[in-house]
Amino acid sequence: MELTDTHSHLYEDEFKDDREEAIQRLKERHVTSVYLPNIDGESIDKMLQLYRSDKKLFHIMMGLHPTSVKEDYKDVIDQIWEKLSQEEICGIGEIGIDLYWDKTYLKEQTDAFEIQVDRAIQQGLPIVIHTRKAFEEAFSSLKKFDKSKLRGIFHCYSGSLEIAKEIFKLGDFSLGIGGVLTFKNAGLAQVVQEIPLERLVLETDCPYLTPAPHRGERNESSYVFHVAEKLAEIKGMSIEEIAESTTRNAINIFGERSCHKA
């Protein structure tokens, strides 16, 4: 069995005291691929250090997270691309629009999102999208592009079946399913039941959104096992079948080798 965590921040400081132990635990849970999204200029060095420790296990992306967007977003995007341009990049992410806290930088977030989507298309890379309280805004941006060239993942999906159907009309997109699937009152299980398995990939978004039975603790990539376990229950399949299918889906998105130079 081979599980894939398509979204992990295992490079963050929350793991500074036991990162090696966390890596050992994910291996024990049969996690064989971990995808690391970039956040901003400050996260690059930490991400690269983890990636270089095991390039077979870890794969990296480049991008400016919407909540990191400020007035200088254009300069920051250029800095990120310059710093990562010689690395083996598997996708552009995480990028998107987040209006959960406030709308102060909506224009800048939208512009940053579209700049990065355009660069992903130019480089033939998938995009990993973060959208929170902003599906309408994200959809409006994506509709400006040729949908035949758009592919990737709507990360940390927790929306409705109707929104999922709209996402699939925008391009070749899959949904990143994480710990929310295990939350009793989230309603995501009912949505996922109606979505074809080939449109789903697994993720943790660690150290955030910890799945049951570990809610209240720090999340980690080994806990993707619990997401797979819940998805297997919902789909009436074995966890081995879920692992095989979702790992294959991740490979279809990111490529057989997973990464190439940007």
Image (cartoon, helix red, strand yellow):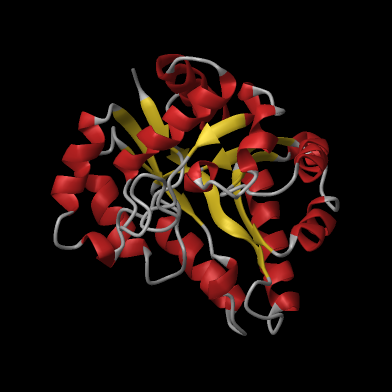
In percent of width and height, residue 49 lies at 24, 55
On the image, the x and y values in percent for residue 24 come to 17, 39
User: From what the image shows, is residue 21 above or below residue 138?
Assistant: above
Point 67% across, 46% down: residue: 122
Residue at coordinates 31% horizontally, 31% vertically from top-left? 31
In the image shown, does 191 or 10 lie closer to the viewer? 191
Vertical arrangement, residue 63 with respect to residue 102, above or below: above
Q: Position of residue 208 (x, y in %)?
A: 41, 58
Q: Quadrant of residue 136?
A: bottom right
> Residue visible at 36% across and 33% down?
225
Q: In this view, does 172 lie above or below 92?
A: above
Q: In this view, does 186 lie above or below 38?
A: above
Residue 42 lies left or right of residue 253; in this view the side is left
Q: Quadrant of residue 228?
A: top left
| Image quadrant containing the N terminus | top left
Quarter of the image where one finds residue 4 = top left
Front residue of 183/259: it is 183
